[in-house]
Amino acid sequence: METRILIRTESGIKGFSYKWNQDQTDAFYQAGASKENLVIHENGTDHNFSYYFPSSNDCHRCHTDSKSVILGFTTSQLNKDVVHNGHSVNQLELFSKSEWLDASDFGGTYSNLPKYVDYRDQNASLDQRARGFMDVQCATCHNLQTNTGNAKLNLNYSTSLAQTGLCNKVPHAGDAGMPNRKLLEPGHPETSILMARLNSNDPALRMPAVATSRIDIDASRMMNDWIKSLQDCR
Ligand code: HEC
Ligand code: HEC
């Protein structure tokens, strides 16, 4: 569909999107944002949806200074077991054996390093799944440094739930059609504004706020179960 490139220039990091032609032989720079209607075949059903090609300005709405602009993968995301030559091995260990990483940067041990779980992993704790998901998908905009309209959230992984600005907090950016409700009500996803935003296709409400138009069903289900599992804001 498109190839996105971030280039380090003298005046900072700039983003560019190149849209591929029908024959997949060449890709062309997209000066502005554009949309294309597509059909996705998923589990035997066709879904129509509008794919959004972000403009260079859109890149910076997510690629903010708060997370070093690049948003490349982090230690927490790479720190997991993978299958290599039929054996299970820690991915960071594999990378350092392949000399892509310097093991001395890690003090030679991987077990103490931070780690995110896969948000689809049913065996992992809901808390870790939800917080890892929000760190990667939401905290680029929702942190203490970035200006996110009226919202006052800090969704970084290390922020305690009470400090995120979500739990039992009144909305600052509209009630999403749910008057007198809180952003997140422990035990009650059905009355939490956060869920209404994740499950909305309305561009004015939908989160993440830019360049996404489909609801992530797996993420929505996981977030629903997480909120249901909460008893309080601790
Ligand atoms: C809706 C938010 C959003 C928008 C808009 C966006 N990105 Fe990203 N981008 C991300 C996130 C989040 C990641 C990291 C994903 C991860 O860590 O798994 C990422 C990763 C990347 C990476 C990979 C970085 C690496 O080192 O692995 C590149 C390159 C990139 N984006 C380029 C662009 C460009 C160019 C644009 C604009 C044309 C753009 N992105 C628009 C959210 C966005
Ligand atoms: C591209 C930046 C961006 C990303 C990524 C993003 N948001 Fe937002 N979010 C915003 C902006 C901007 C607003 C405020 C809109 C306004 O002022 O009307 C907002 C508002 C919200 C609100 C309402 C806050 C309030 O006080 O009313 C919630 C809840 C929210 N976002 C959750 C999320 C979640 C969860 C994710 C990740 C799945 C996410 N956002 C990803 C930019 C973003």
Image: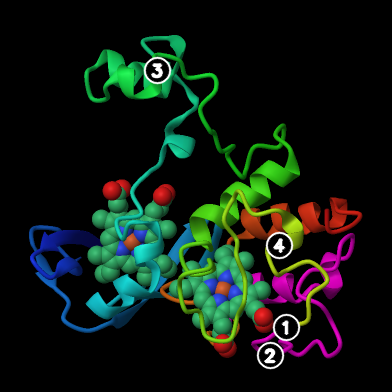
Indicate the secondary structure of the residue bearing disc 4.
Answer: helix
Q: Nearer the viewer, mark 1 or mark 4?
A: 4
Indicate the secondary structure of the residue bearing disc 2.
Answer: loop
Residue 84: mark in rendering: none
Q: Is mark 2 within 8 Å of ligand 2?
A: yes
Q: Which residues are magenta?
A: 172-201
Residue 226 percent coordinates (x, y): 77, 52
Left or right relative to 15: residue 146: right
Which residue in the protein does label 2 denote? Answer: 174
Mark closer to the chain start, 4 or 3: 3
Give the distance between the C-alpha atoms of the residues marked 2 and 4, in whole angstroms.
Answer: 20 Å
Which residue in the protein does label 4 denote? Answer: 163
Which residue in the protein does label 1 denote? Answer: 171
Give the distance between the C-alpha atoms of the residues marked 4 and 3, in whole angstroms.
Answer: 32 Å
- 93 relative to 209, above or below: above
Mark closer to the chain start, 1 or 3: 3
Res 16 seen here: yes
Residue 28 percent coordinates (x, y): 10, 70
Name the amino acid type tagged 4: Gln
Characterize the local packing of mark 1: few (<14), some (14-19) or many (20 or more) Cα atoms within 10 angstroms.
many
Q: Are marks 2 and 1 in contact (CB under 8 Å)?
A: yes
Name the amino acid type tagged 3: Gly
Mark closer to the chain start, 2 or 3: 3
